[in-house]
Amino acid sequence: MLRIIYLSLLVLFSPSVLAAANPWQTLIPELERGQKPAPINHDVQLDERAPQIKTGGLVHALDGQNMRMPGFIVPLESDGNKITEFFLVPFFGACLHLPPPPPNQIIHVSHPKGIDMIEPWEVVWISGEMQVKATDVEGLASAGYAMTLSKEPEMYTP
């Protein structure tokens, strides 16, 4: 009986199960998931953007996988009504008010048809084919992943 309880707890709290509960964890290599993030430099002047910490590996097994990810949209290109290129980031204010997360926590998304403008604090789900592909937006951040959307973003519901 104790063996069954022990095995159940082991499976319940295994890194892969915990990663499934937080999709952003799946973008971090398994051996890096327990590492403490690099400290943020709070000495940056208000008129400067804090630099991105470019640590962390990528999970190459995700290349070509269909995935669904929640996050916040940081618009990169728009025509005023539609966003045609954006970063998806795991927390509000990333890249704008706070230092960008590491590249393995940013997804670069292009959508030629464009998506409707949304408020920056709104959380969305995006779905599509994940690509392990570095993209650098000078002066803002580097992304370690890219995604081709398979459908329009949906408002977040847990």
Image (tube, rainbow, N blue to C red):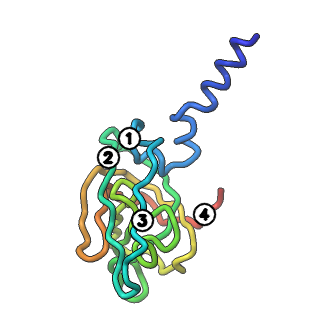
Residue type marked 4: Tyr
Q: Residue at x 49, y 52 (%)?
A: 68
Q: Are marks 4 and 2 in contact (CB under 8 Å)?
A: no
Which residue matches tag 2?
58
Can you say whether 21 is above or below 91 in the image?
A: above
Q: Quadrant of residue 35?
A: top left
Q: Secondary structure at mark 3?
A: loop
- Residue at mark 3: 40
Q: What percent of the width, then of the height, locates residue 134?
A: 24, 57
Residue 57 in the image: x percent, y percent? 31, 46
Q: Amino acid at mark 2?
A: Leu
Nearer-N-terminus badge (2/3): 3
Quadrant into which the C terminus falls: bottom right
Provide the secondary structure element on which disc 2 rests.
loop
Q: Which residue is mark 4?
A: 156
Q: Is residue 71 left or right of residue 28?
A: right
- Residue 80 is left or right of residue 124, and the answer is left
| Mark 3 surroundings: few (<14), some (14-19) or many (≥20) residues within 10 A | few
**Disc nearer the start of the sequence (1/2):** 1
**Residue 112 spot, x, y in % from top left:** 32, 72
- Using the numbered discs, state the Cα–Cα distance from disc 1 to disc 2 in whole angstroms: 6 Å
Residue at the (29%, 58%) spot, across then down:
54
From this view, report whether residue 131 is shown above or below residue 143: above
Image height check: is 81 above or below 62? below
**Distance Cα–Cα, label 3 vs label 4:** 28 Å
Residue 44 horizontal side relative to residue 20, left or right: left
